[in-house]
Image (cartoon, rainbow, N blue to C red):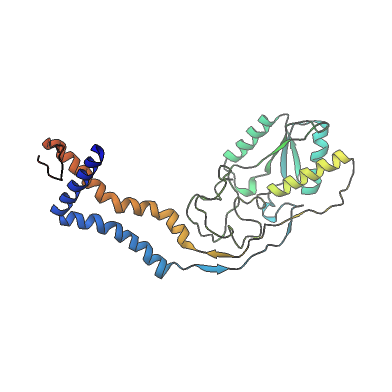
Amino acid sequence: MGRANQFLLLMWKNVVLLKRAPVKTFFQIAMPLFFIAILVLLRAFEIKNEYKPNITYPAFDVDKLPPDLYYFNQIAFSPNTSDVRQVMDMVKKQLSLLLVPFQNEEDMVKALVSIEGKGEKPSNVKVLGGIAFNTSLNHGDIVYKIRLSSKSRTKEKNSKRGFGTDPSASWNTQFTFPVFEIPGPRKRNATHGGPPFYFEEGFLSIQHAVDVAIIKYKAKIDKLNATVSVKRFPYPDYIHDNFVLVIQSSLPLLLMLSLVFTALNIVRDVVYEKEKKLKVRKCYKFMCHH
């Protein structure tokens, strides 16, 4: 029972201290209630949830580059071997781009980075990106990379930025979900899916063109009798509630502010006892002396 008595003694001491400082006690109780009231008022009067019906998106073709990339007329590739050249000739024909060959991926990346680092205006930029094949096309699995600019060239028009990072600044491949997730589809009205703009940047068109070219090369055919289109996953009925976003972003701050006064007083009391060299002796029946 020693520790239980010590705990009860400490609680009794705290009650006595609180009774001796009614103003401090009032603020310690009132501040958490005040910030809780802010959240309750936001929920009750300002932030309302709204029912949203399900939404489906139309399909779109990826056999050509999007019109916004009209100023690009070249695409790089590596390595410059006969099999890769045959595949890239088919890509060139489908996307209407000129080919820029490199012997290896390292040289290609250096050239692309050099072009991007010059900060040229879009009207002067010629190379859309690069395609690097890591394996031979004649045997085994075919592995290739699509190397585009590290920064998005597409700018959202009249966009309203929410909380978190700017999705148009880069591809954001380090994120699985947004920084703050709320119910509902991301970019509800974006047919192509919104940031990071896989269609608008030409990624989907390049990937589709390379895949079709590889199929033709492996099957030894001149034409592929298949049409490929892409569309976003549909989203079911949901409740649009901005209060979820408010809680995610503001609750930690409100908790810190509501307890900061209490924490400061605890630190002050501990420092005061150390300075005065006060120590509560072990006692019973809630009777103790300093």
Q: In the rendered view, would you say 272 is above or below 243?
A: above
Of residues 205 and 231, the one nearer the viewer is 231
Image coords of residue 251 (percent x, y): 39, 54
Give percent across and percent down for residue 137. 81, 33
Q: Residue at x 34, y 52 (%)?
A: 255
Query: Please, which residue is most extreme toward the left here?
Result: 289
Question: Which residue sits at x=15%, y=45%?
Answer: 286
Image mark count: 0
Query: Quarter of the image holding residue 271?
Result: top left
Q: Residue at the location (56% across, 49% down)?
A: 177
Q: Give the left or right position of residue 38, taking residue 248 as reference.
A: left
Q: Quadrant of the C terminus?
A: top left
Whole-percent x and y of residue 256? 33, 50
Q: Left of 51 or right of it: where is 27?
A: left
Q: Along the line of sight, which residue is nearer the eye, 13 or 265?
A: 13
Indicate the position of residue 158 as horizontal and vertical percent values: 54, 61
The residue lying furthest to the right in this view is 221
Q: Which residue is drawn at 88% across and 41% down?
A: 219
Q: In this view, does 245 lie above or below 179?
A: below
Side (left or right) of 237 relative to 40:
right
Work out which quarter of the rendered image holds the N terminus and state it: top left
